[in-house]
């Protein structure tokens, strides 16, 4: 468009590279190719039937109008009850804010806590949209290089080292995307104590809670009741397209969050909220736990298989459904390797460029949100693709 000028921030918000990989995968499938998806962070099981039935019943009952901006009171109470059941936390439902996805929760926090020029510390690598939300509100991310030695997580020492007068908060994730690492109770306590002493806010993304293997993730609220928590119905509960999440906030912040929600998106989808009431039923939770066991088996197959192929994965992830792998045995241009594997072997994986800058071109992410049979096929194809890779 001649003469059109976009806002400066648009040039500073990077594309989500995995979506380009997904688009290419879909194009190949449209040509009749059999593509194995290991790129997208979406559970392959679909939404549990009890939740679907609740959504269908809600639609039949005509629950299509707006809800209160903070969410249905019954759902806020159900979320609070879940924290009591799972973590032993006595959580006031008034602190629960229902949002359109975990992204909606991060948008609210960003708008509330971040002034123009304010900084939020986060690990590099990390989920890319986090830093882009900050740019949207004229803040900025302080990306702190993190390696396998720390589980690709921030440490109190790193926070101390990078904190300055413009810093407002620390954002971490447990389990994390792309690494799958889980912060222990002691690590969360140390991060909370350090951030509080520095005068900042601690925000913890707990979106992959429930998807842990051989351990149970500690909620930061168990050790720091004043922390902020992002969560979602997308991953553990398999409700990605329903676009529903929640935020746990200090009670004093809730009136301001309500004001923001009213103006930014009015409310989360009503049908999704009604459906999510069934997520906490015994039937739904039993289904979700069985799926966790399946993810565990997939991780235990894929991790040694990729190591045997030559990918460097020194850190064994305890959660989520990702393996973040060093590909320097094959290349220092991981994006080109991803393109090679999708074009020649029709296996879609994500380049490290999506997750930050620190050694990003040396890493790739594998999602094991696919059946064990398909993962076995993927390993065979990747091995063949590596044999045909220049220099191997």
Image (tube, rainbow, N blue to C red):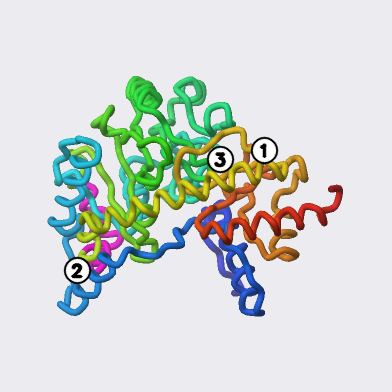
Residue 156 in the image, given as x and y percentages of width and height: 44, 22
Residue at x 54%, y 57% (from the top left corner): 372
Tell me if mark 1 has few (under 14), some (14-19) or many (20+) residues whose alpha carbon lies within 10 angstroms of its own. Answer: some
Secondary structure beneath disc 3? loop
Label drawn at residue 312: 1
Left or right: 215, with 359 as reference point: left
Disc 2, disc 1: CB below 8 Å?
no
Left or right: 362, with 74 as reference point: right
Q: Is residue 46 visible?
A: yes
Residue at x 33%, y 33% (from the top left corner): 218
Residue 204 in the image, given as x and y percentages of width and height: 37, 38
Tell me if mark 2 has few (under 14), some (14-19) or many (20+) residues whose alpha carbon lies within 10 angstroms of its own. Answer: some
Of the pair 205 and 35, the residue shown nearer to us = 35
Q: Quadrant of residue 188?
A: top left
Q: Quadrant of residue 380?
A: bottom right
Question: Magenta segment, which residues?
Answer: 256-273
User: Alpha carbon of mark 3 to alpha carbon of mark 1: how far?
Assistant: 16 Å
User: Alpha carbon of mark 3 to alpha carbon of mark 2: how far?
Assistant: 38 Å
Mark 3 vs mark 1: in front:
1
Residue 223 included in the magenta stretch of the image: no
Depicted 266 relative to depicted 106: above or below: below
- Between discs 3 and 2, the one toward the N terminus: 2
Residue at x 62%, y 79% (from the top left corner): 30
Q: Which residue is mark 3?
A: 125
Q: Is residue 135 visible?
A: no
Secondary structure beneath disc 2? loop
- Between discs 2 and 1, the one toward the N terminus: 2
Label drawn at residue 66: 2
């Amino acid at each position: 468009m001649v003469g059109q000028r976009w806002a400066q921030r648009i040039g500073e918000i990077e594309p989500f590279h995995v979506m380009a990989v997904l688009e290419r995968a879909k194009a190949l499938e449209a040509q009749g190719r059999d593509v194995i998806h290991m790129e997208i962070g979406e559970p392959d099981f679909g939404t549990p039937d009890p939740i679907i039935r609740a959504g269908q019943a809600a639609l039949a009952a005509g629950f299509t109008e707006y809800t209160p901006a903070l969410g249905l009171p019954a759902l806020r109470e159900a979320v609070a009850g879940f924290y009591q059941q799972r973590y032993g936390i006595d959580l006031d439902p008034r602190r629960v804010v229902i949002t359109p996805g975990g992204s909606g929760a991060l948008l609210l926090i960003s708008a509330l806590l971040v002034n123009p020029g304010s900084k939020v510390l986060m690990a590099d690598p990390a989920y890319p949209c986090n830093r882009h939300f900050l740019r949207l509100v004229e803040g900025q991310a302080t990306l702190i290089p993190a390696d396998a030695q720390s589980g690709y997580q921030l440490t109190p020492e790193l926070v101390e080292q990078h904190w300055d007068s413009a810093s407002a908060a620390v954002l971490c994730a447990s389990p994390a995307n792309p690494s799958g690492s889980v912060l222990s109770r002691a690590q969360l306590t140390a991060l909370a104590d350090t951030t509080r002493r520095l005068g900042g806010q601690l925000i913890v993304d707990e979106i992959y809670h429930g998807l842990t293997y051989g351990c149970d993730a500690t909620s930061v609220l168990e050790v720091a009741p004043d922390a902020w928590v992002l969560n979602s119905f997308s991953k553990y509960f398999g409700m990605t397209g329903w676009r529903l999440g929640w935020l746990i906030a200090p009670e004093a912040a809730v009136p301001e969050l309500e004001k923001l929600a009213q103006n930014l998106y009015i409310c989360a989808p009503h049908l999704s909220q009604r459906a999510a009431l069934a997520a906490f039923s015994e039937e739904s939770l039993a289904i979700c736990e069985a799926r966790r066991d399946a993810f565990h088996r997939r991780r235990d197959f894929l991790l040694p298989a990729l190591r045997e192929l030559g990918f460097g994965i020194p850190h064994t992830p305890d959660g989520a459904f990702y393996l973040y792998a060093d590909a320097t045995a094959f290349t220092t241009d991981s994006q080109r390797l991803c393109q090679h594997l999708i074009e020649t072997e029709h296996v879609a994986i994500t380049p490290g460029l999506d997750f930050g800058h620190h050694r990003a071109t040396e890493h790739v992410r594998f999602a094991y949100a696919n059946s064990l049979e398909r993962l076995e096929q993927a390993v065979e194809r990747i091995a063949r693709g590596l044999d045909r890779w220049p220099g191997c």
